[in-house]
Image: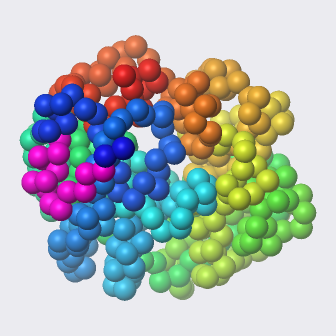
Amino acid sequence: METLKPRDAQDVEDAVRAAIAGEQPLEIVGHGSKRAIGQPMVTNALLDLSALNAVSNYEPNELIITVEAGAPLNDVKSLIDSKNQQFAFEPIDTAMLLGTAAGEGTIGGMIAAGLAGPRRIRAGGARDHLLGAHAVSGFGDSFKAGGRVVKNVTGYDLCKLLAGSWGTLAVMTEVTLKVMPRPESERTLLLRGLDDVTANAAMTQALGSPYDVSGAAHLPGSVLRTTAAPLGELGAPDQALTLIRLEGITASAEHRAASLAARLAAFGKAEILEDAASSAAWVAIRDVAPFAASGPRALWPVWRIVCPPASGGQFGATLSRESQGEVFYDWGGGLIWAALPPSADAKILRQRVEAIGGHATLIRAPEPVRQAVEVFHPQSPGLAALGQRVRASFDPKNILNRGRMLRGAAT
C-alpha cells in the first residue's frame, strides 16, 4: 500500500486531488489506533496525517486550543493538564479495548470517532466542544467551518457533521476545541451488591438529584470477577459495584457526596472513593477495561449500545442472561458495553435494541465478522437517504474512507 504523508494542508489538498483524478480511494489515518473499528476497507493508498502535529494556538485564559489533526492526543492532554484544564467529554482511549499500543490516538481521530466517556451525561460529546475546523473535502478543496468562539458560527455548523463521521466527509487538518477547568476534587459513591435493574434505579435517582452528578456506572459482579485493577480490587468476587461521581471544589464535593449518600440510603450504605482512587476507577470505566483485548473475553465481539437510560438495566440483564455474554453500564444506564459470544446474532440484537429506541455499534471484532455484519447501526430509509446526500455534497466520488461506515460500499 502506498503511504502519503503530507506536511501541511496544501499537501493534503494535493493528495486528495490526485486521488480524485485517479479514482483511487484514500484511507485516512492519524496514528492508526482505531483502524480496526468500522467495515474493512479496500484501498491502495494511505493518507497519514501524523506529520500535522503542531499546537497552533493555546489560550488557557480563553479556554480554547487550536491544534493540527495529527497531534497526539496524550501530548495535547498533557499540555492542557499543565494548566489544570481538560477535555470535559473524557475522550476514550481505545488502546486497551483494541489491543493497540497505548497513547497512539490523535486529535483528529478523537473528533472523527466522537467516542465520549462517562462525563458525557453532563458535558456533552466531542461535537459539543468542537468550535472550528479546517478540512479538505472530497472535491479536493480546503474549507473552514466554525471559528474560535461559538458566536462566530453562522449558517450551517459543519463542525457538527465532522464529529463522528469517521473520516468519510472530509480530511481534517486543524481543529479548535473548548477546554474546561479540571475539578479540584472528586468523590465517588460506591454501592455494593445491587442487581442491574436496582442499580439502574439508583443511578436514575442520583442523576435526578440536585447534586450535579458527573458519572454513573454499574458493573455486575460477573464482569468484575476477571477484571484487573483498579476495578477488580474494589469488591469481593461476584459482588456488583455501582459508582456515582461528583466533582468540584473539595468542600462542595464532600458535602454533595454525603448528602447524596443519605438520599440513596435505601440502596445500601455508600462507601466513598476520593480523588486518585476515584479517578483511576473512572479511567478504567471510560476505556472499557473489563473487556480488555488482553483479558479472557479477548475473542468476543464488543458492542456499544446506546439506549434510553431508564431501559438500560432491564435490557442489559436480559441480554447477558440470554446470550451468556457480559455487560456493564455507563451514562446512568444509557450506554451499555456488551461482550457477547461469537455465536450471538447481530440481527436479533439490533432488533431488540431498536425496540427500546436505541442503536448498537460493533466496536471490536475480527475482520471476517466485520465483513459479515453492519458495524454501524443501519439507519431508517429516510435517514439513510439524507446521509447519502450529505456524503455526496462533501465527497461525490466516495474517495475518503470508502466503505468504512457502510457495508458493501468499499467498491
**Is residue 12 on the magenta stretch?**
yes
Q: Which of 344 and 257 is in front in this view?
A: 344
Q: In this view, does 348 lie above or below 19?
A: above
Q: Can residue 153 be seen in this view?
A: no
Instruction: Find residue 280 and report its horizontal and vertical position in percent.
Output: 63, 74
The answer to whether 396 appears left or right of 294 in the picture is: left
Colouring style: rainbow
Instruction: Find residue 228 and report its horizontal and vertical position in percent.
Output: 76, 67
Q: Nearer the viewer, residue 194 or 354?
A: 354
Q: Quadrant of the C terminus?
A: top left
Marks counted in the figure total 0
Q: Nearer the viewer, residue 377 or 31?
A: 31
The answer to whether 179 appears left or right of 146 in the picture is: right
Residue found farthest to the right: 237
Q: Can residue 329 be seen in this view?
A: yes
Instruction: Find residue 92 and report its horizontal and vertical position in percent.
Output: 50, 59
The answer to whether 97 appears left or right of 239 in the picture is: left
**Is residue 251 on the magenta stretch?**
no
Residue found farthest to the front: 1
- Image point 89% across, 67% down: which residue? 236
Q: Quadrant of the N terminus?
A: top left
Instruction: Find residue 6 and report its horizontal and vertical position in percent.
Output: 20, 57
Q: Is residue 331 above or below residue 212?
A: above
Quarter of the view holding residue 150? bottom left
- Image point 82% across, 30% down: which residue? 322
- Image point 59% across, 53% down: which residue? 98
- Image point 67% across, 40% down: which residue? 301
Q: Which of 354 and 8 is in front in this view?
A: 8
Residue extent of the magenta highlight: 3-16
Q: Is residue 75 above or below residue 138?
A: below
